[in-house]
Amino acid sequence: MLYPEGGFWGANANIYSNLSKEALKKRLGNMEFINQVLVTLIKNTDMESTLASILDLALKITKSEAGGILLTDQLYNKVQIMLVRGDMTSTQLQRILDHANFINKPKVAREVTYITKNSSDFRKMLTADPDLLAFISVPLIVERRTVGILVLMHRRHTGAGDHSASYLPQDIATISIFASQAALVLHNTLLKLENGKKCVYLETIAALVTAIDAKDKYTRNHSKNVSRVAVALAQELKLSTQEIQTIEYGALLHDIGKIGIPEAILNKNGKLAQEEYEIIKSHPVIGVTILQPVDFLQSTSAIIRHHHERIDGRGYPNGLIGEDIPFEARIVSIADAWDAMTSDRSYRKGMSKEQALWELQNNTGSQFDAYMVKAFVSMHKQNRYPNELNCNFLCGYCSRND
């Protein structure tokens, strides 16, 4: 029996109209109780307490003997058991869920599902749990996205007192109301954790960028300058917010691998020997290796690895040609060259903007992407080049001022 999101009320709008005054008073009391507990729920700041409170209250509302709460991974379209209650282990619950395909695909798990003894799915679940009497799954949905799933069960217990063997429509109505509010609480906790995690990561980025600039005396503020220019070009190309953020972080960290390059080579005044140049050329691969353990920054790996590739295939480390070079890396390549050409160094004066634009155009099709260079030149000629970087990282993300 399926109750599509919001559809339960349309199909069962007469439930409350047919209730006696006493039953209606009981229902309203339940709603008041739910709201009071939800107020307490909101005060939870850690995931463990939030999950436990949601599941425990769901079990109490439905008088279920066992249950669990799952979190969904929309990217990989899978679920993970986070907590189990009742005379059951996570392994036992997983065996039951293995027969519930609708749960194992959270992108389609958008309905309250009640499985009774008459269904073929229930008979399959009995092979995993012979004591199972009734089973419901309740999605926790926020903005049309399933952030979690409650699974609740009536089970047969030896020596247990009188208990239900099925769920009534009123039970499902009540748990549906609760789920809609609990989903918001869960979503809020997830956001807090995610933002906290990002703050830690971004503080790490700040430390790494500082470490890069401190090691190479010729490129102070180079990483931030490249990020500013790359973001401006990405905005000119009308990229999405997510793509621009990836380019911002990737540009900030494009030279992170230089941490692994000896300072004697980085700060050498004269021309590099071929052997020294080969060591310098290893910094993109070193950079990817350094950031590999950080999941949050994996989207930047293409930029870090390929920002020294050339359109004609003569770049490094992989000698990619044309559009085989990731578009984010092609953007950062232009920004990297622009800052290198226009910045003053202790051993030379920076080029004028006019001369640097000419260099970019002169190397179009060999070193740089022709379409992107055209957009970059147009951006300058139309005075659309921003003086300040409009991005989260440099404007005080997580209440920090850089």
Image (cartoon, rainbow, N blue to C red):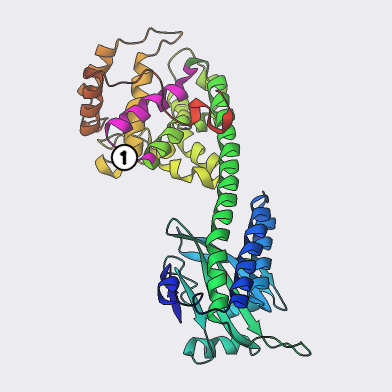
The picture places residue 401, in percent across and down from the top left corner, at: 56, 23
In this rendering, the answer to whether 265 lies above or below 311 is above
The picture places residue 306, in percent across and down from the top left corner, at: 38, 38
Circle 1 crowding by C-alpha within 10 Å: few under 14, some 14–19, many from 20: some
The picture places residue 373, in percent across and down from the top left corner, at: 24, 28
Q: Residue at 59% across / 43% down in the picture?
A: 197
| Amino acid type shown at disc 1 | Phe
Q: Main secondary structure of the magenta part?
A: helix
Callout 1: SS: helix
**Is residue 202 among what the camera can see?**
yes
User: Is residue 375 found left or right of 395 in the rendered image?
Assistant: left
**Is residue 282 among what the camera can see?**
no
Q: Residue furthest front?
A: 21
The tally of labels here is 1
The picture places residue 308, in percent across and down from the top left corner, at: 37, 32
Range shown magenta: 219-241
- Res. 195 image quadrant: top right
Task: Looking at the picture, tell me which residue is in the foreground, 117 or 179.
Answer: 179
User: Is residue 49 found left or right of 196 in the rendered image?
Assistant: right
Q: Residue furthest right?
A: 159
In this rendering, the answer to whether 370 lies above or below 149 is above
Q: Which residue is mark 1?
A: 327
- Res. 323 image quadrant: top left
Task: Looking at the picture, tell me which residue is in the foreground, 274 or 39.
Answer: 39
